[in-house]
Amino acid sequence: MVDSNNEWNLLAPIIPFVLVAPILYMQGWESVEAAFLIVVVPLLTFPIILVVGQVYNGNETWKNRYKEGGIFGLGSLALSLSIALWIAYDYIAGSAHFEMNSVVEPFSWLTFDVLHHDGSQWDISSGFADIGVGVWIDPVSLMLLFVATFLCFLICWFSLGYMNTDPINEDSNHRFYGVFVLFAIGMFGMVLADNFLWLFIFWEIMGLCSYLLIGFYYWKDSAAAAAKKAFLTTRVGDVFLMIGLLMLYNIYGSLEFSIIFDDPSTGVGGALVESADLNWALLMLFIGAVGKSAQFPLHVWLPDAMEGPTPVSALIHAATMVNAGLYLVFRMVPFVDVHVSGVAGLEDFALIVAWIGGITAFMAAAIAFVQNDIKKVLAYSTMSQLAYIFTGLGAGLLFLNIGEYHAGYFVIGASMFHLFNHAMAKGMLFMASGSVIHEIHHAHHHLHHDDHDFDPQDMRNMGGLASKMPVTSTAMMFGSMSIIGIPLIGGFWSKEGIIAETWLACLHEEPLMLGPAILVLATAGMTGFYMTRMWLMTFAGSPKTDVAEHVHEGTPWIKEPLIILTLITAIGGFLLALLGVVDYLGGEKDHLAMHGLLDTLKHAFLPDDNELRIVGWTTILLAAILGPIIASRVHGGRLAEGAEANPLVGWLVNLSSRFGSQDVSELADSQLAEALQRRLYFDDLYEWIVANTAIPFASFSAWFDKNIIDGFIKQIESNSTSGSVTVRSITTGSTRDYILMAAVGMLSIFALIWGVSA
Amino acid sequence: MITLLPLFAGLLMLILTQVLPNTQAEGMARISRNISMGIALAVAVITTLLFIGHWGSIDWTNITQGGYVLQNDAIDLIPSIGVTWKVGADALSFPMIWLTTVLIPISMLVEWNAKRGHLFHPLLLVMEGALLGVFVVLDLFVFYVFWELTLIPMFLLILMWGGEDRRYAAMKFFIYTFAASVIMLVGILVMYFHTDPIAGLGSLTGHHFDLVAMTAQNNLIPSEGLRHLVWLMLLIGFATKMPSVPVHTWLPDAHVQAPTAGSMLLAGVMLKMGAYGFLRVAVTIFPESTIEFIPLLLVLGMASLVYGAWVCMGQTNLKRMVAYSSVSHMGLIFLGIATMQPLGIAGALFMMFAHGIISPLLFAVAGAFKHHYHTLEIGSMRGIAHHSPWLAAHMMLGWMASLGLPLLAGFVAEVAIMIAFWMTFGWLVLLPALTLIITAVYYLSSMQRTIFESNDPEKGILPDTMHDEEPRDITWHENAGMLVLAAMTVLFGIMPFIFWDMMSDWSSGFTVETLIDAMHSQEWMP
């Protein structure tokens, strides 16, 4: 194994990419003018990686110096990141303002005219129908842009270690990096897009990349099937999303944010927008979001998506792509915000969003209880956390639609902040799990060369790794804490807000919110359990297999991203909360401003509102104390004799052994556990439906086409064959007869037609 | 001129190779292949230069309905019955012309090593001439002649280079479409006998076949019943060519048996003749009947689209599946026209073009499977991506383009037609939209069961038809041809406006000048 320090010189080709942003700055460019480069440079890079990789496949220089294209991918992502940081700086601390969100003049992509009926006659209106493309920037897209560019960069870095040292990936990593960069284009483009059509276009690009990367190990049946499942499930959502776009277009005569959001209550030609129409349109869009963000009932693809390489899970199926659905729902805020110019009467829609969120959060957390595959636990956790954000957005939309805009902006901001915290923590958790899997795999390869039945992702094969993997275990601990919502760490600052406001919505505004409110509260406790369980099963106790005893944390390129993200997760949430990021993201304030430390703490722990205080402390009790303690009783334990963990995680291992132990094998054999193992039978149900309706119907169609429709034609053929036998008898063989017949025939045809026409 | 060059050059070479003594046949094969390619490339360059305005400095946008560019002074061919040689192009025909000229060299390249190359490549040139003829002539008689002329090279291609069942497929293809064309001919003749006389034309009959004059003539057929009848006759001819359900069954047979280049041209250009003719003749001259029959168009389009997709899903033969997917996509063209929106019509035009570059890619991929793995059975092999990474990559791109992935050409047409469809028909859009899911299902399943899934990273599972043959990737010329098609798919997906602008302008002009009046007279409301 090469020491990681010796590989830093490989980063030399990245330098020119990083220099682009400073040079443009010195040339006097505005940061947003350079925004297009965020998409265009990767767009030029990815085909190069693919083609060069295919041509120089196996070449030593390509493999060792350029990491099979990984270095170029990293370079273009570094460029995107540097420009994104530049833009963020300009808007947060510099001179740029959000007044004109659509900051780059869009160029026309498709222009066309529309024919419309003005009551008495048809008329054509030209010029107004135009689908262009430009750049849109507001606080949330700024935040998402940072999340996307930053995580893409870090995970690409991580992949240099993870992918390129795995012998099974040998000579196919250009495929990985090429598609990885294409994915980045999709995410960056979607965040920057200034209209719904381009949002949809990039949305679909991400879907493609998700398909390609889940199916990266295409020779595995399970990977190929999972890829197909992911594409088709999200495709169902996407089709509805597209219908939603058609409806929006019909209402507003445009799909551009600037035109629609200018005044969502008036549609094309100044007509008032009916809430029923808009309700349907938003519902269709929401189905698309449900598919992409893996919410009930289109959630089945996400756990299977873990078939892809771990960096892919980290990037796409946890940190970025699945946030697309949340972003889309966030974009619906102006439609419902009656405080500005939204359309009243959309409470039902908001309730649907909240309910879907609540149900998914609870269901996913429950399924996560019984998973033994480390990545599957994280996958269900992702689903559950995204559902939190949906619930928060649902509550926010509800508040905004009935005019409670302070509460609305607050919970929307909290939801978006949770998106940030979750993305950072989950990206790191997946990379940490990748680190674990990678090292276990190596250790296993080293020990039992011929045994192929070993599952390196099964937590029952791990245990006691805290002493072997100090960086990874620390990272994973902070990540889990953030997801659980341990006070002061990452996700706490946002989750608290979501749960509290959901309860407020239920208590003060809409009794039907009770369902989501109870579900998210219960889920908070369950999150505490399953995340702790995962950590303890992996890192605490004594090693459960000989493989786990021989693990080292030695692969280069893997530690740096973990350390950076650990810092962000541990203190980033707190710092941003101090800066008032919730108000900023919610749209209540257009700048970040330092709040007092005590103020912030008081707001979080001792709010004036009595109900908020009760909800807040209940959440802390459930999530930070009850859930982890139960998990410790089941899975906690000291490390093996002589093993020593670093002090950052050592306390946790020791603490976990203090709560006694409990045997849950009876519960694990129960029918409920079985049902959870089978993912509550949703996958089985869908498969059964498809196998019993669509496939037989398709076979029937094929049969029908072959035997009935074409059979009919064949019947004519055979009839005419027998007819020709009869006709042959009047063929006399005399040329004179033929000419006569032909002439008579021609004349009669002409006469006939002439007669008919005249 | 550009029409006749490939036609006569091709014919000349065909004759020469037959006439020359056997000793020179081999050398002739090599030369005629190269000459054919040279001519085809030259023609492609000419049309490209015409398009970018380098020659003739034509502004392709803002060509209104009836305004043709590159028109010639009509030359009398058969003055006694009013047949003239009259050509011209507009935004409806030019994309098709360009497509034809580009596809011919590509299909030649893909089958560069075809057996009996001295016949094969010149035959493709003849094909090119006939196809170009269909798209450029503005005289219905000559149009019909070219229309039927395209059958002959395709018939020969299937008959001489086809698969095991080629005789049956070739005959079926020929008789089926010929029979439909004859019905169309009757319709054309009825139109002919209703034309007003033009001085100097048709000295014997007093009528003429001039399409432009027919379009300009008000109320060509006064009797409504007869007009509808003629419209339906035309529809039969054009719909069979497109092909639309229920007259589509010749297509899968023809495709499965046809050689790769034949399939590529058949799907890429010949099917578009139907849509082109329908718009150029039936809709342009009889807008009232078109509006009257919108429900019929809707039913035909929906049936082709939805039913075609379901049949696709039930196929086990790769080429058959791709052929049915063409039926399915052609259904969208009828739907686009049925919307009566400029956007929908422009979408239909773009669909013709986009499908014209995507489907040749699909058939090139299918042909490569046949060529290198000797079978087209989906499921008879697994993990082919390991042996043929380039083939797998092209398959992935083509399949994705065909299922409507954004930033690839097909998406633009699909989304345009969908938007227009919602404007006119509202919730009915659910049917075509949900069909997109079925499309995704059959495409993804077929990929999963050919290029993926072998459970062994070291090798794929080869079909039985390979016997002991070593699996290979596609040859360089196949790869080059497919790369050009793939690049075009991406180019027109990212920058559709290259052709979209002129199509959109044409559709708007067409709507204003032809459809609106008819809508008013028919009091049509969606």
Image: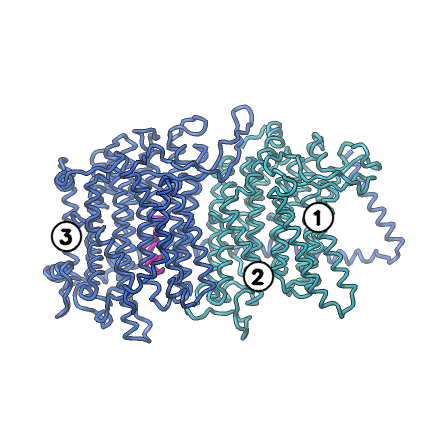
Chain colours: A blue, B cyan
Q: Quadrant of the N terminus of chain A?
A: bottom left
Q: Left or right: B439 with respect to B150?
A: left
Which residue ends up furthest to the right in the rendered image? A736
Q: Could you tell me residue B459's position as x and y percent?
A: 45, 70
As for residue A309 lying within the magenta part, the answer is yes
Which residue matches tag 2?
B478
Numbered mark located on residue B264 in the image:
none
Q: Could you tell me residue A357's position as x and y percent?
A: 29, 45
Which residue matches tag 1?
B3
Which residue ends up furthest to the front in the rendered image? A26
Residue type for callout 1: Thr
> Looking at this view, is A598 or A668 the one in front?
A598
The answer to whether one can see residue B463 in this image is: yes
The answer to whether one can see residue B345 in this image is: no
Residue mark closest to the camera, 3 vs 2:
2
Residues packed near mark 2 inside 10 Å, few (<14), some (14 to 19) or many (20 plus): many
Which type of secondary structure does the marked residue at label 1 adopt? loop
Residues packed near mark 3 inside 10 Å, few (<14), some (14 to 19) or many (20 plus): some
Residue drawn where x is 88% and y is 57% of the image:
A734
- Magenta highlight range: A291-314
When the figure is inspected, residue B498 is found, relative to residue B455, above or below; the finding is above
Which residue matches tag 3?
A626
Q: Tell which subunit mark 1 falls on.
A: B
Q: Tell which subunit mark 3 falls on.
A: A
